[in-house]
Amino acid sequence: MLTPFRRLGTIVLLLVALEVGLGLGSAALFKFGLVKTVLLPEDDYLEPPFQWHPLLQAVPMPTRAGIWERNGVHHNAQGLRGPERTAQALDGKVVIELFGGWAAYDVYSPEGETWAYVLEKQLGKNHYVVLNRAVSGYSTAEHLLQTAFYGTPYGETPRCAIYQVGWGDLPSAHISGLDPGYADYHMPWLIDALHARWLGGPFLAVSPTLALLAPLATWIVDTARPASEPARTPGGGADPAFEAVYVRNLHAISAINRQRGIKTIWLAQTMNRGAANKSTGALGAETERLNAVLKREAEAHGRPLCRCPRRNLRQRRLQGHHPLRAQGVAEGRALVGARVGRGLSLAS
């Protein structure tokens, strides 16, 4: 007969065996391409912190000291990517707001190397302040909400706003019966993409069992349902319904900024064609299609459009297919920064 102490020890051993089995088993299945994630705990949980928001779905949380800093990403007290600032520090300076998705947020670069930081340095830190309001995964739907309802937290009216748009909208292309606010797929997808649910984060990352049970608990208790893959129209090419929503968002953002006396500068997404492969080929074609729409609308309304020429990019010095993704590579950032600087002159 087992004593209470031995019963407790048996339970602990069973839990340990379950943890090891789930962790190693998922790793083996992942190696053979049978599952998409590994349940083994990470050495460091390096995901930047985000929290759920009832309108934007996911917003950056101010960075906490310690483990959150190890990936080099810092969210200041106002929830913006970049250094701590005060309203007094903005006095007498030209304020520029940068909106965009993961490329503008620059998730792969530590503080001091992000494109927003480099742009501020190029323009002159004594006269300009670049506030990075970009968030990984954001589309023009989120940018419209940011522009309409959430002004700069420092109370200063920006001189201009730069929007790098395109990739955040592409997942909503070719969806049958697309919701005009992207609420049928993109918005709920963003919650889990940025790990913004209350049940998640580094506390679950240490346990394969908890990581496996978390989605089940989400289905049971969380009213924000996880996104499911929507029905899509077959084939590629243009999607008039999607592009109409995209253009509407562009016009609305420009109109709001114009009414407030804020100049709008559009920044096209840039693909490095030298790094293209089969998986990025379709993305490149869709990106170019949206860039053409952006160019058409910017020219029709007299708004500056900046773009980094692909012929000036060197594949061997870049990671992936975007010039702003590589850590420590100033060439792509300087090139785009110079274009934006000229755009600022045009927007004056």
Image (cartoon, helix red, strand yellow):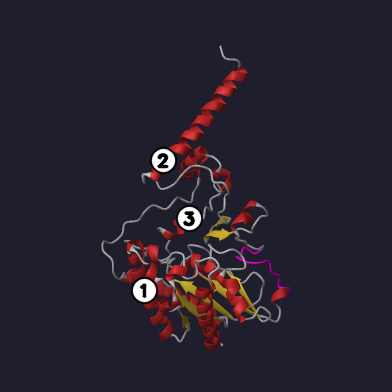
Quadrant of the snapshot with the C terminus: bottom right
Q: Amino acid type of disc 3? A: Ala
Distance, label 1 to label 2, CA atoms, is 39 Å
Work out whether residue 323 can be spotted.
yes
Mark with earlier residue (1, 2): 2
Q: Is residue 81 magenta?
A: yes
Residue extending farthest to the top is: 1
| Horizontal relation, residue 93 to residue 133: left or right | right
Mark with earlier residue (3, 2): 2
**Which range is magenta?**
78-88
Mark with earlier residue (3, 1): 3
Residue where numbered disc 2 is placed: 28
Quadrant of the snapshot with the N terminus: top right
| Residue 270, percent from left and from top | 43, 73
Residue where numbered disc 1 is placed: 288
| Residue 102, percent from left and from top | 50, 64
Q: Amino acid type of disc 2? A: Ala
Q: Does the magenta stretch include residue 245?
A: no
Which residue appears at 54% of the width and 45% of the height?
Answer: 205
User: Which SS class for mark 2?
Assistant: helix
